[in-house]
Image: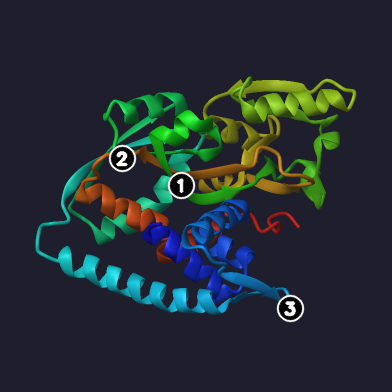
Amino acid sequence: MDVKQLNYFVQIAKYGSYSLASQKLYISQPALSKVIKNMEEEMGFTFFYTYQRKQKLTDAGQAFYEKAVRLLDNYNDLIQTTYTEEGIDKGHLRIGLSVAGGGALFSHIVPGFNASYPQITFSIFEKETNLLKEELLKKNLDLAYIDLRHLNGAEDEENFESYSILNSENVLVASVDNPITQKHNVGYEDMYDQRLILYNAGKEIGSQTEMEIKRLGFAPNIVLVSTQWNFILDMVANNMGVVFCPYYIYNKFNSPGLTCVKLNEKIGYREIGIITKKNEYKTRACTCFLDYATDVDKYEHVMNKLIFSGSVSD
């Protein structure tokens, strides 16, 4: 059990709901439930019971909650006291960004972090997820932003620590002049008369799009394939076609010529987060960044812009 897990428990108790707590913590509800279940097994008692659709603390859970709150307060005081000496918050970080869109989230976080820690600098490396994992294992990177769904089984679980930050659904991005933007929401069946642009054919979004459209009985009209989101969205703005795109990327590259439409189903849902090499010493600079990047309350106003409300083109 660690401080992060204790905070998860405290947030559920605070909001009385796994769902609300998962939204505030930017972690999936199943993952949050699993953490709590493991904590209950470790402690040997149940934390919560359900009453009128709310999560209420058991007697043992209440006692544990009061001690957990005190422990977290003491921990935060300890960190603040220990690291306020002049010059200690210095250092250099080597950060990997997945080409699938890790940079879009990083770019929203780093301005606030830089304001808090102006003496911590960065080197940025953008690569495919598998290459980023290799660089972490070789100790050539301190941390990396990736889609956490690309962590594969027991081997990756043994090698990496992961920190979930943002769950993002996809939307259909189109030119504001495209009539499809008048729809409240769309599905694969609406692509029969659309020119499609695919992100990196053979990868997740592109291959799933082709497969699902063909399953409906017609061949997709693919006019362009690229691995560069900025180029793809420029082409969409010029009405060359439409693209299925993670909302947080659409938000980053948004322009007056673009809009997006909600999908009938979650296509290419992503869970963006950070990975580090497991059981590896973390420098003060790395610890500062992880604490800041995973404490989403510090930049909740930014995160809210990256989560699709469904009202862009309504």
Closer to us: 10 or 125: 10
- Give the residue type that dot 3 points to: Gln
Q: Residue 71 falls in which quadrant of the image?
A: bottom left
- Secondary structure under the numbered disc 1 in the rendered image: helix
Question: Quick check: marks 1 and 3 in contact, CB under 8 Å?
Answer: no
Please report the residue visible at 73 percent of the width from the left and 48 percent of the height from the top: 261
Please report the residue visible at 56 percent of the width from the left and 57 percent of the height from the top: 37
177 on left or right of 65 = right
The residue that mark 1 highlights is: 105
Is residue 6 at least partly visible in the picture?
yes
- Give the residue type that dot 2 points to: Asn
x and y percent of residue 86 in the render? 9, 63
The mark lying in front, picked from 1 and 3, is 3
The residue that mark 2 highlights is: 279
In this picture, is 200 found above or below 154? above
In this picture, is 250 found above or below 294? above
